[in-house]
Image (spheres, grey):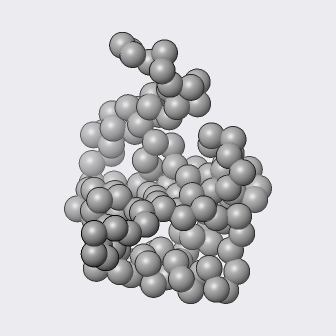
Amino acid sequence: MAGTENFTADERAAMKERAAEVRASRKKAGKDPEPEVLARIGELPEPDRAMAERLHALIRDAAPELTPRMWYGQPAYARDGKVVVFFQAATKFKTRYSTLGFSEEARLDDGAMWPTSWALTSLSGAELDAITVLVKRAAG
Protein backbone atom coordinates (compact mmCIF):
# COMPACT_ATOMS: atom_id res chain seq x y z
CA MET A 1 0.00 0.00 0.00
CA ALA A 2 1.64 3.23 -1.16
CA GLY A 3 2.20 5.86 1.51
CA THR A 4 1.50 3.56 4.44
CA GLU A 5 4.76 4.50 6.14
CA ASN A 6 2.93 7.52 7.59
CA PHE A 7 0.48 5.29 9.47
CA THR A 8 1.00 3.37 12.68
CA ALA A 9 0.78 -0.41 12.68
CA ASP A 10 -2.63 -0.12 14.41
CA GLU A 11 -3.89 2.31 11.75
CA ARG A 12 -2.68 0.02 8.93
CA ALA A 13 -4.40 -2.92 10.63
CA ALA A 14 -7.66 -0.92 10.85
CA MET A 15 -7.47 -0.09 7.14
CA LYS A 16 -6.92 -3.75 6.28
CA GLU A 17 -9.83 -4.68 8.52
CA ARG A 18 -12.05 -2.15 6.73
CA ALA A 19 -11.06 -3.56 3.32
CA ALA A 20 -11.95 -7.06 4.55
CA GLU A 21 -15.29 -5.74 5.83
CA VAL A 22 -16.10 -4.28 2.41
CA ARG A 23 -15.28 -7.58 0.70
CA ALA A 24 -17.30 -9.55 3.26
CA SER A 25 -20.31 -7.21 2.98
CA ARG A 26 -20.60 -8.03 -0.71
CA LYS A 27 -20.88 -11.72 0.18
CA LYS A 28 -23.36 -11.09 3.01
CA ALA A 29 -25.78 -8.88 1.09
CA GLY A 30 -29.28 -9.35 2.47
CA LYS A 31 -28.15 -11.06 5.69
CA ASP A 32 -28.67 -9.60 9.16
CA PRO A 33 -25.34 -8.05 10.27
CA GLU A 34 -26.31 -7.77 13.96
CA PRO A 35 -25.04 -11.23 15.02
CA GLU A 36 -21.57 -10.39 13.67
CA VAL A 37 -21.57 -7.03 15.45
CA LEU A 38 -22.59 -8.66 18.74
CA ALA A 39 -19.93 -11.35 18.30
CA ARG A 40 -17.24 -8.73 17.70
CA ILE A 41 -18.40 -6.71 20.71
CA GLY A 42 -18.14 -9.92 22.73
CA GLU A 43 -14.47 -10.22 21.72
CA LEU A 44 -13.56 -6.80 23.13
CA PRO A 45 -11.61 -6.75 26.39
CA GLU A 46 -13.18 -5.19 29.46
CA PRO A 47 -14.12 -2.42 30.12
CA ASP A 48 -14.60 -1.75 26.37
CA ARG A 49 -16.92 -4.75 26.02
CA ALA A 50 -19.33 -3.57 28.72
CA MET A 51 -19.37 -0.06 27.28
CA ALA A 52 -19.96 -1.32 23.72
CA GLU A 53 -22.75 -3.63 24.90
CA ARG A 54 -24.51 -0.78 26.70
CA LEU A 55 -24.11 1.54 23.72
CA HIS A 56 -25.37 -1.13 21.32
CA ALA A 57 -28.54 -1.64 23.36
CA LEU A 58 -29.03 2.12 23.75
CA ILE A 59 -28.55 2.84 20.03
CA ARG A 60 -30.82 -0.04 18.94
CA ASP A 61 -33.51 1.26 21.31
CA ALA A 62 -33.11 4.98 20.54
CA ALA A 63 -32.77 4.59 16.77
CA PRO A 64 -34.07 1.19 15.62
CA GLU A 65 -33.95 2.42 12.02
CA LEU A 66 -30.14 2.37 12.14
CA THR A 67 -28.56 -0.90 11.02
CA PRO A 68 -25.64 -2.27 13.05
CA ARG A 69 -22.51 -3.08 11.07
CA MET A 70 -18.76 -3.30 11.45
CA TRP A 71 -16.67 -0.29 10.42
CA TYR A 72 -12.88 -0.34 10.68
CA GLY A 73 -13.27 -3.32 12.99
CA GLN A 74 -15.55 -1.44 15.38
CA PRO A 75 -19.33 -1.40 15.92
CA ALA A 76 -21.17 1.19 13.88
CA TYR A 77 -24.78 2.01 13.02
CA ALA A 78 -25.85 3.05 9.54
CA ARG A 79 -28.74 4.57 7.65
CA ASP A 80 -29.09 3.47 4.02
CA GLY A 81 -25.65 1.86 4.18
CA LYS A 82 -23.89 5.00 5.43
CA VAL A 83 -22.47 5.09 8.95
CA VAL A 84 -24.15 7.61 11.25
CA VAL A 85 -22.71 6.69 14.66
CA PHE A 86 -19.77 4.52 15.69
CA PHE A 87 -17.93 3.29 18.74
CA GLN A 88 -14.15 3.07 18.94
CA ALA A 89 -12.80 1.00 21.81
CA ALA A 90 -9.93 2.49 23.79
CA THR A 91 -7.96 -0.70 23.27
CA LYS A 92 -8.18 -0.40 19.47
CA PHE A 93 -5.53 2.31 19.33
CA LYS A 94 -4.29 2.03 22.92
CA THR A 95 -5.86 5.30 24.02
CA ARG A 96 -7.00 6.26 27.51
CA TYR A 97 -10.64 6.63 26.49
CA SER A 98 -13.16 5.09 24.10
CA THR A 99 -14.85 7.27 21.51
CA LEU A 100 -18.46 7.68 20.47
CA GLY A 101 -18.39 9.37 17.10
CA PHE A 102 -20.81 10.66 14.51
CA SER A 103 -20.17 10.89 10.78
CA GLU A 104 -21.22 13.61 8.36
CA GLU A 105 -24.41 11.56 7.87
CA ALA A 106 -25.49 12.40 11.43
CA ARG A 107 -28.01 15.18 11.71
CA LEU A 108 -26.23 17.05 14.48
CA ASP A 109 -25.57 20.33 12.67
CA ASP A 110 -25.81 23.26 15.06
CA GLY A 111 -24.79 26.54 13.45
CA ALA A 112 -21.30 26.80 11.99
CA MET A 113 -19.60 24.48 14.51
CA TRP A 114 -20.54 21.38 16.51
CA PRO A 115 -18.84 18.37 18.10
CA THR A 116 -18.73 15.08 16.20
CA SER A 117 -17.18 12.80 18.81
CA TRP A 118 -17.06 12.32 22.56
CA ALA A 119 -14.47 10.70 24.79
CA LEU A 120 -15.95 8.04 27.07
CA THR A 121 -14.31 6.68 30.20
CA SER A 122 -17.47 5.28 31.79
CA LEU A 123 -21.22 5.34 31.28
CA SER A 124 -23.63 6.41 33.99
CA GLY A 125 -27.21 7.62 33.87
CA ALA A 126 -26.27 11.18 32.86
CA GLU A 127 -24.02 10.05 30.01
CA LEU A 128 -26.55 7.48 28.80
CA ASP A 129 -29.31 10.11 28.80
CA ALA A 130 -27.14 12.55 26.82
CA ILE A 131 -26.12 9.84 24.34
CA THR A 132 -29.76 8.84 23.83
CA VAL A 133 -30.62 12.43 22.88
CA LEU A 134 -27.63 12.64 20.52
CA VAL A 135 -28.40 9.33 18.81
CA LYS A 136 -32.07 10.21 18.30
CA ARG A 137 -31.10 13.56 16.85
CA ALA A 138 -28.35 12.08 14.66
CA ALA A 139 -30.70 9.45 13.25
CA GLY A 140 -33.27 12.21 12.71
User: Residue at 33% of width from left, 38% of height from top?
Assistant: 22
User: Residue at 71% of width from left, 69% of height from top?
Assistant: 122
Judge left or right: residue 114 versus residue 54: left
Nearest the viewer among 28 and 52 is: 52
Outermost residue to the left: 80
Nearest the viewer among 34 and 85 is: 85
- Residue 59 is at least partly visible in this image: yes
Q: Position of residue 55 (x, y in %)?
A: 57, 70
- Residue 85 is at least partly visible in this image: no
Quarter holding residue 115: bottom left
Judge left or right: residue 117 versus residue 90: left
Q: Quadrant of the N terminus?
A: top left
User: Residue at 58% of width from left, 24% of height from top?
Assistant: 9
Compared to residue 32, the image places residue 70 above or below, namely above
Q: Position of residue 138 (x, y in %)?
A: 35, 74
Outermost residue to the front: 112
Q: Position of residue 20 (x, y in %)?
A: 41, 32
**How many numbered marks are there?**
0
Q: Position of residue 107 (x, y in %)?
A: 29, 72
User: Residue at 66% of width from left, 50% of height from top?
Assistant: 90
Q: Quadrant of the C terminus?
A: bottom left
Compared to residue 62, the image places residue 116 above or below, namely above
Compared to residue 134, the image places residue 120 above or below, namely above
Outermost residue to the right: 46
